[in-house]
Amino acid sequence: MLYVKAPAKINLTLDVLYKRPDNYHEVEMIMTTVDLADRIGLETRKDGQIKIVSADRFVPDDNRNFAYQAAELLKNTYGLSEGVTITIEKQIPIAAGLAGGSSDAAATLRGLNELWNLNLSLDELAEHGAKIGSDVSFCVYGGTALATGRGEKIKELSVPPTCWVILAKPKIGVSTAEIYGGLKVDNIEHPNTTKMIEAIENNDYPLLCESVGNVLESVTFELYPEVVTIKEQMQRFGADAVLMSGSGPTVFGLVDHEARVSRIYNGLRGFCEEVYVVRMLGDRNPLA
């Protein structure tokens, strides 16, 4: 059995520029991986089948699962007779704006590349990932990057300033399609992506905190007021910057002093069950 780590991501910025003719949105976003991760186990099967095994009943075990799609894509593209059993040990909450499913797919691509001796580069694996979902290419690389297009064009950035990341997810799942569908592109305040890149490249933590922004917040906040509550509480408890990740509903807070971390964590645990304290990973993934 080969095991591969599948880290979650957060959006330091998420901007939508316009609606494209193919019905996707043209995005510009800065993402970074954090050390909350699923664990993917891969074992070759001789019968050619793809099997998903997970103790989490919310993980689909058929081709709705991105990890299944990743294995199927490699099998079909390279005409392979082998199958695989994919064991998914979930730590990343589902439908949370943290790219859990996309990261599982990316880890499956990286792992099967080794298990099936395909000798593909990260760039080639990321190209395959783009066919599965918008965040999969980024998750193949990991680290910190500017993602453009519909999320599949990736430009590597430096490691961000070191800090703690507190994640809080309310007891709801959010549909990405629903949130993007509710966005009025002509009426949004765009985050300053250039300023965020400058903050990362110069290791400037105060500027990074000042530059966070996510245009999807307005839509999710209107539909799910509990997400607003979490953001307000996190700000009240003293996080340096607070933002919703992706289309939500997870909200994260950045904190550079450890003394404040437990106060914020304990405050949030009073009304939110799923709270995590993690660090940014910074570095890119290895091939597997």
Image (spheres, grey):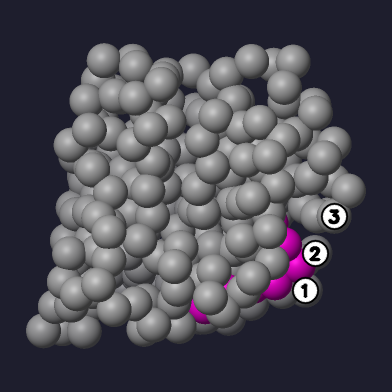
Q: Quadrant of the C terminus?
A: top left
Name of the residue lying farthest toward the right: 270
Secondary structure category for the residue under label 2:
loop
Secondary structure category for the residue under label 1:
loop
At which x and y percent is residue 226?
69, 66
Disc assigned to residue 57: 1
Please tell me which residue is depicted at 85% across the width and 36% down the height of the picture: 266
Question: In the image, what residue type sits under mark 1?
Answer: Arg
Name the image quarter holding residue 192: top left
* Tag 3 residue: 271
Please tell me which residue is depicted at 45% across the width and 73% down the height of the picture: 219
Q: Residues within 10 Å of mark 3 (few under 14, many from 20)?
A: few
Up-down: is 28 above or below 94? above
Q: Residues within 10 Å of mark 1 (few under 14, many from 20)?
A: few
Q: Find the distance from the CA under tag 2 to the CA under tag 3.
A: 26 Å
Q: Nearer the viewer, residue 114 or 227?
A: 227
At which x and y percent is residue 287?
38, 35
Badge 3 vs badge 1, beta-carbon distance below 8 Å: no
Q: Quadrant of the N terminus?
A: top right
Question: In the image, what residue type sits under mark 3?
Answer: Phe
Q: Can residue 23 be seen from the camera position used here?
A: yes
User: Which range is magenta?
Assistant: 169-177
* Tag 2 residue: 55
Q: Nearer the viewer, residue 121 or 76?
A: 121
Secondary structure character of the magenta stretch overall: loop
Q: Is residue 176 magenta?
A: yes
Secondary structure category for the residue under label 3:
loop
Up-down: is 37 above or below 67? above
User: Which is nearer the N-term, disc 2 or disc 3?
Assistant: 2
Q: Is residue 168 left or right of residue 16?
A: right
